[in-house]
Amino acid sequence: MLTQTAIHNGSFNHSSIRVMPSTCAKQHDDPIEMLGAPMLFARNSEIYGEGEPAEYIYKVLSGAVRTYKILSDGRRQIGSFHLPGDIFGLEGGDEHTLSAEAIAETKVIVIKHSAVMALADRDKNVARELWAMTRRDLQRVQEHILLLIKTAQERLASFLLEMANRLPGGNAVDLPMSRQDIADYLGLTIETVSRTFTQLENAATIEVPTSRRIVLRNRPALNRLNA
Amino acid sequence: MLTQTAIHNGSFNHSSIRVMPSTCAKQHDDPIEMLGAPMLFARNSEIYGEGEPAEYIYKVLSGAVRTYKILSDGRRQIGSFHLPGDIFGLEGGDEHTLSAEAIAETKVIVIKHSAVMALADRDKNVARELWAMTRRDLQRVQEHILLLIKTAQERLASFLLEMANRLPGGNAVDLPMSRQDIADYLGLTIETVSRTFTQLENAATIEVPTSRRIVLRNRPALNRLNA
DNA sequence: CGGCGGCTTGATCGGTCTCAAGTACGGTGG
DNA sequence: CCACCGTACTTGAGACCGATCAAGCCGCCG
């Protein structure tokens, strides 16, 4: 298992990734999760790369993950952020169509793809659940497309509302990702993201006590921007 | 069956939609297709609307279909074009998350969603095939996202290469959709699309004998733009 | 205290949008 | 057959938003 771990992490950061005692995995009731073992990924370490065989799927326990593609000229588009509770790595068939990296120190459950498929063959409900997860991914990507045709303010408002919904803390949001990550998710530059944060702060729509902590002060205004 | 047909087409264009003799449907060997009946939709008629219950799925026989969402301010984003051979209407679970319209006079096979699901429950291969189709949709949408972060020339080049691959005719492409449809797919205005066609024509990368007919004259140049 | 990474701010540039005409094409009726 | 119309498409001029290039700032850690 340790050698398999190495495969997933490319050629660097091995020392930062440890398989955890498998006993921790058994305290969950989801039959899919019980197939997996917990693992730790260091900040900015690769979980898998685009085009690699999809040997595993993953569920985030803590931390955060970004999946992305790189264009030939170096532009990076982040496809999605995965937060605790999210499952990722199902987007392709035999191989991953995106790369995945840990945004911060991240704990995930790693589940063998073949084991999941075998389970799905035996249990109709598992098969249905997996298909439903892919459909939800599809719908999220369709929403993401809508983001990309909006103005900078609208994109950031939509992003903040999404994060406030998906992270605990109500109106106070602790973003796990950098401005660059946000920019690459929203299809903007880091400068435009920064300026737009400032504009929303000046309009008293949000507060930015520290760069990673955002307080939503005026949700109606954000919803209006959400178009 | 005729009354069900009416439900799908909103309040207009009923006269243009006819169920065809069901015998035509039986000449296919795909078990999913055999569940369906052929239908005809007039140009610009609605096939289904966002939020409606997903009672049916569809396979294009001839013509073309656009699926889209409308933002509150009226902007329209086309999610995908469906050409002969494509199956659509699987994107949601119980309800459609996009609207669908015929771009031109379009013949489709209409298949009851419940019948497909029942078949999937009985036949593992059907279940797997349906899931794989959803994954392919997901991958196409991810590619679509990449389009939206490119320049106008890059977007149009990618679009033309995609259409040349999906439509018969090699380097001569007969587009079924209008400039407005292309604009709403690429996240541009109609004027920018038109100007970009002209630029590519001036650069001898394409020829535009009529507005809907495009001849790819220099594929390497298009591939270079494809980034 | 110095240095570095992440973030913000400023000035300018450029690509796309907007608004406004003008043109080509297909269909309809005389 | 032609005159007319409406729709789709193209072209032009100018405005605007976000990108780019370039400093500066802040917090953190050695």
Image (cartoon, coloured by chain):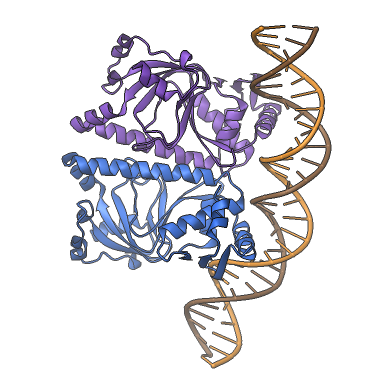
Chain colours: A purple, B blue, C brown, D orange
Q: Is residue A216 above or below residue B118?
A: above
Q: Is residue A108 above or below residue B183?
A: above
Q: Is B58 in front, or is C3?
A: C3
Residue C7, percent from left and from top: 67, 24
Q: Is B58 in front, or is A90?
A: A90
- The answer to whether residue C2 is left or right of residue B176 is right
The reply to whether residue A120 is in sight is yes
Quadrant placement of the N terminus of chain A = top left
Q: Residue at 41% across / 57% down in the picture?
A: B166
Q: Residue at 45% across / 31% down in the picture?
A: A49
Q: Quadrant of residue A178?
A: top right
- The answer to whether residue D28 is left or right of residue B79 is right
Q: Is residue B168 above or below residue A48?
A: below
Residue A62, percent from left and from top: 45, 17
Quadrant placement of the C terminus of chain A = top right
- The answer to whether residue B166 is left or right of residue A177 is left
The reply to whether residue A223 is in sight is no
Residue C25, percent from left and from top: 54, 76
Q: Is residue B74 above or below residue B209?
A: above
Q: Is A159 in front, or is A50?
A: A50
